[in-house]
Amino acid sequence: MNVPSRSAALHLTIATPSGVLVDSTDVVAVRAEDATGSFGILPGHADFLTVLVPCVLRWRTANGEKRFCAVSGAVLRVVDGGHVSIACRAGEPGEALDTLEARMRALREARLDAVRRARVEQMRLNAQAIRQILKYLRPEGAQAGRADGANEGGPHDGQ
């Protein structure tokens, strides 16, 4: 059985496809966010794997410094109670928490807006396809009907 180490510090690594953003061995606490909410990791944490939502990671070093990194598309893994590895599509280390949180909010809003626009476009294309199908299914005589779309002399006009 693998017993987690009870070292005084965590080894934190944050990496993107283009390189390592953070590689710190003096981390005493990490805070992140997944779909269930915010959570913390301390030395000796159980092995853990989760997918992070776009968020600002926070960590504290042994000398009390607070550090931050905005990440999106990330997976967090804790191994042996002392190694925290985060692999993300994109990340941005920064000193100002407020600035990084504002960027993450703007990114979330932009993604939601893109999803809304895609949904509207999908509905428009769907409606256009239905109109084309109905046009194809109408009998030829119906297409030569009145300009307002109503046909005269059809089987249902009371004659």
Image: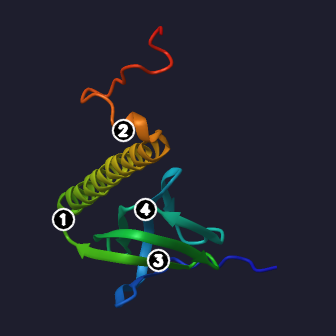
**Of callouts 4 and 2, which one flags the residue occurring earlier in the amino acid sequence?**
4
Q: The residue tagged with tag 2: helix, strand or loop? A: helix
Q: Amino acid at mark 3?
A: Ile
Q: Is residue 35 left or right of residue 153?
A: right
Structural distance between the alpha carbons of marks 1 and 3 = 20 Å
Q: Position of residue 99 (x, y in %)?
A: 17, 61
Q: Residue 55, located in which quarter of the rendered image? A: bottom left
Q: Position of residue 26 (x, y in %)?
A: 41, 81
Structural distance between the alpha carbons of marks 2 and 3 = 62 Å
Q: Position of residue 28 (x, y in %)?
A: 44, 71
**Of callouts 2 and 3, which one flags the residue occurring earlier in the amino acid sequence?**
3
Q: Which residue is label 4 attached to?
A: 31
Q: Amino acid at mark 4?
A: Arg
Q: Which residue is label 1 attached to?
A: 96
Query: Closer to the camera, 101 or 6?
Result: 101
Structural distance between the alpha carbons of marks 3 and 4 = 12 Å
Query: Closer to the camera, 138 or 131?
Result: 138
**Of callouts 4 and 1, which one flags the residue occurring earlier in the amino acid sequence?**
4
Q: Which residue is label 3 attached to?
A: 86
Q: Which numbered disc, 3 or 4, marks the residue closer to the eye?
A: 3
Q: Which residue is label 2 attached to?
A: 143
